[in-house]
């Protein structure tokens, strides 16, 4: 960060998979300004595992007639998934969707794509195994479901029988 980042605090784990995980973090810059960001990390051993599995794929491909090209294509896709620089490039290319759209004489701008993290004074470059993204605006799915759950529980409680058969009390 060349001295631009003072602190990174992990707020929560957003998700983990066999190849990596994503973390919601607070990044505090040298001016003391805190920014929310998502840090995506690949696991350190994932490249070694890929090389071992690649050898197995290639061995099998030689034994199955006509499968060498199919296996190689699949391996190429897997290797791309294990290089966050490719995903970072795709994120940058996706920013074209942030431009407002003219539809039936109205300007619409309700779609936004992921964005690589950057501030006025610095950005964090994408590496093969690390990518930092701006936190997307809006609510998480969990929070949205929780917002629905509370009124549903209230309604469910209101619909409980009062003791008399087929009678509900709404007071």
Image: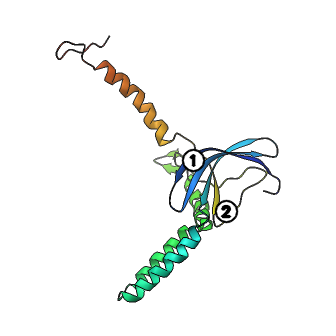
Find numbered disc 2 in the image and state the secondary structure of the residue it sits on: loop
Q: Quadrant of the C terminus?
A: top left
Write the residue at 49% across / 46% down. 105
Q: Quadrant of the N terminus?
A: bottom right
Q: Residue at x 75, y 46 (%)?
A: 7
Q: Position of residue 82 (x, y in %)?
A: 56, 68
Please state the horizontal and vertical placement of residue 41, each as a whole percent of the image: 61, 58
Task: Identify the residue at the far top of this view.
Answer: 171
In which quadrant of the rendered view does residue 48 lie? bottom right
Q: Dot 1: within a 10 Å radius of its alpha carbon, few (fewer than 14), some, or many (20 or more) residues?
A: few
**How is colour applied across the structure in the image?**
rainbow
Q: Quadrant of residue 12?
A: top right
> Residue 3 shows which numbered tag?
none
Quick check: can you spot residue 72?
no
Circles 1, 2 touching at the beta carbon (< 8 Å)? no
As measured in the structure, the alpha-carbon distance from the residue carrying label 1 to the one carrying label 2 is 20 Å
Q: Is residue 64 left or right of residue 160?
A: right
Asked if residue 29 is positioned above or below residue 146 in the image, the reply reads below
The location of residue 33, given as percent across then percent down, is 76, 41
Where does label 1 land, which residue? Answer: 13
Q: Residue at x 39, y 26 (%)?
A: 151
- Tell which tag, 1 or 2, sits nearer the viewer: 1
Q: Nearer the viewer, residue 125 or 21?
A: 21
Question: Relative to 128, does residue 23 appear above or below in the rendering?
Answer: above
Camera-side residue: 104 or 52?
52
Which residue is tagged 2? 126
Residue depicted at 57% across the width and 43% down the height: 137
Name the spot of residue 43 as percent of width and height, x first.
Answer: 59, 62
């Amino acid at each position: 960060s060349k001295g631009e980042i003072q602190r990174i605090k992990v707020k929560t784990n957003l998700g983990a998979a066999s190849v990596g995980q994503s973390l919601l973090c607070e990044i505090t810059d040298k001016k003391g300004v805190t920014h929310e960001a998502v840090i995506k990390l690949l696991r350190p051993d994932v490249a070694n595992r890929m090389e071992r599995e690649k050898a197995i794929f290639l061995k099998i491909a030689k034994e199955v007639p006509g499968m060498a090209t199919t296996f190689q294509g699949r391996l190429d896709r897997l290797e791309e998934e294990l290089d966050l620089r490719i995903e970072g490039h795709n994120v940058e290319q996706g920013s074209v969707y942030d431009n407002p759209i003219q539809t039936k004489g109205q300007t619409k701008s309700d779609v936004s794509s992921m964005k690589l993290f950057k501030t006025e004074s610095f950005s964090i470059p994408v590496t093969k195994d690390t990518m930092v993204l701006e936190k997307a605006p809006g609510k998480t799915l969990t929070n949205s479901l929780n917002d629905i759950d509370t009124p549903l529980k209230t309604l469910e409680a209101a619909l409980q029988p009062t003791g008399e058969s087929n009678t509900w009390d709404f007071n």
